């Protein structure tokens, strides 16, 4: 078993977290944000295109609401990850 200095372990952990964020977490968050935006835009399209039907306009409103909620959730997750990274001194 190899004994490492504390600085080496910290650098190794920081490197791992940085690679994990760059390769998985932030691309996944960007993808989910794009999906939320598309849901919102689809809802707006449904709302405008079906102006004569109350049921279809209600579906459009619901999609727009879900899209906004999705965008807020993704923005909150991104903010929490940034705050946590800064708190623990991990550069991202």
Image (cartoon, helix red, strand yellow):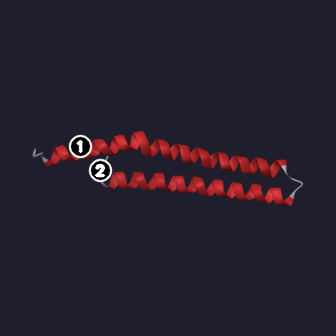
> Is residue 50 found left or right of 74 in the rendered image?
right
> Is residue 65 found left or right of 59 in the rendered image?
left
- The x, y position of residue 28, in whole percent, is 49, 45
- Residue placed furthest toward the front: 1
- The x, y position of residue 10, in whole percent, is 22, 47
* Disc number placed over residue 67 in the picture, else none: none
Check disc 1 and report its element: helix, strand or loop: helix
Pointer 1: residues within 10 angstroms few (<14), some, or many (20+)? few
Vertical comparison of 43 with 18: above or below: below
Of callouts 2 and 1, the N-terminal one: 1
Pointer 2: residues within 10 angstroms few (<14), some, or many (20+)? few
Residue plotted at (70% across, 55% down): 63
- The x, y position of residue 2, in whole percent, is 10, 44
- The residue that disc 1 covers is 12
Quadrant including the C terminus: top left
Residue plotted at (56% across, 47% down): 33
Compare residues 29 and 78 and report the one nearer the observer.
Answer: 29
Vertical comparison of 42 with 55: above or below: above
Residue plotted at (82% across, 56% down): 56
Vertical comparison of 59 with 90: above or below: below
> Is residue 6 found left or right of 55 in the rendered image?
left
* Residues at circles 2 and 1 in contact by the CB criterion of under 8 Å: no
Residue plotted at (73% across, 51% down): 43
Give the CA distance from mark 2 to mark 1. 13 Å
- Asked if residue 91 shows in the view, the reply is no
> Is residue 58 found left or right of 21 in the rendered image?
right
- The residue that disc 2 covers is 89
């Amino acid at each position: 078993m190899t004994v490492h200095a504390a600085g080496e372990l910290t650098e190794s952990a920081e490197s791992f977290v940085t690679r994990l964020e760059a390769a998985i977490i932030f691309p996944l968050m960007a993808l989910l944000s794009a999906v939320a935006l598309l849901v919102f835009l689809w809802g707006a399209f449904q709302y405008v295109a079906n102006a004569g039907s109350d049921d279809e306009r209600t579906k459009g409103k619901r999609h727009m609401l879900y899209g906004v909620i999705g965008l807020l959730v993704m923005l909150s997750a991104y903010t929490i990850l940034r705050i946590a990274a800064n708190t623990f001194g991990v550069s991202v």
